[in-house]
Image: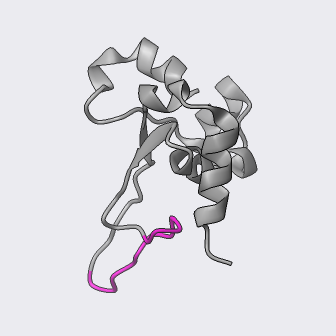
Amino acid sequence: MILDLQIRHPEAASTGVFKVASQRVDRYGIRRDVYATHRQLAGYGLIRRADDPNRSPDGRVLRRSSQRYTSQPYRFTTLNDGFDRPALTTVTAHLLSQPG
C-alpha cells in the first residue's frame, strides 16, 4: 500500500503517504490488525513512520484537558535500502533486539 501510494503521489515524498482507515479497508483490504504491523515493518528497516507529537509511541492520542486535538493519520515512506538486505538476517536481528 505504501509503495503504491508513493508511486501515485510523488509530491508526498518528503512528508510521507497515508490512507485513513476506511480507505485502507476499501481500497487495499488492510484492516486494523494488519495495519498494526507497520511497527514490525519499521523495525525491519522497510518503512519509516513520521511520528505525531500528539501521540504516544503506541499510537494513543495524548489528550490535554485544555486543548482539542484531531488525530492525524500516520505518514509513511519506504526505505529502499531495507529491501536490499537479506530478510532472515534482518528479521532475526530485530527479534533478538526486542526486550523480553
Where does the magenta region start and end?
Answer: 56-66
Q: Which quarter of the image is occupied by the N terminus? A: top right
When the figure is inspected, residue 50 is found, relative to residue 64, above or below; the finding is: above
Residue 59 falls within the magenta-colored stretch: yes
Q: Nearer the viewer, residue 23 or 38?
A: 38
Q: Nearer the viewer, residue 80 or 8?
A: 80
Give the main secondary structure, helix, strand or loop, of the magenta stretch: loop
Residue 83: which quarter of the image? top right
Taking the image as shown, residue 32 lies to the left or right of residue 17, namely: right
What residue do we see at 64% from left, 42% from top? 89
Taking the image as shown, residue 20 lies to the left or right of residue 75, namely: right
Counting from the top left corner in percent of width and height, residue 47 is at 48, 38
When the figure is inspected, residue 98 is found, relative to residue 83, above or below; the finding is: below
Counting from the top left corner in percent of width and height, residue 52 is at 34, 58
Residue 88: which quarter of the image? top right
Identity of the residue furthest to the bottom in this view: 65
What residue do we see at 61% from left, 53% from top? 93
Q: Nearer the viewer, residue 38 or 82?
A: 82
Q: Which quarter of the image is occupied by the C terminus? A: bottom right
When the figure is inspected, residue 23 is found, relative to residue 38, above or below; the finding is: above
What residue do we see at 56% from left, 45% from top? 44
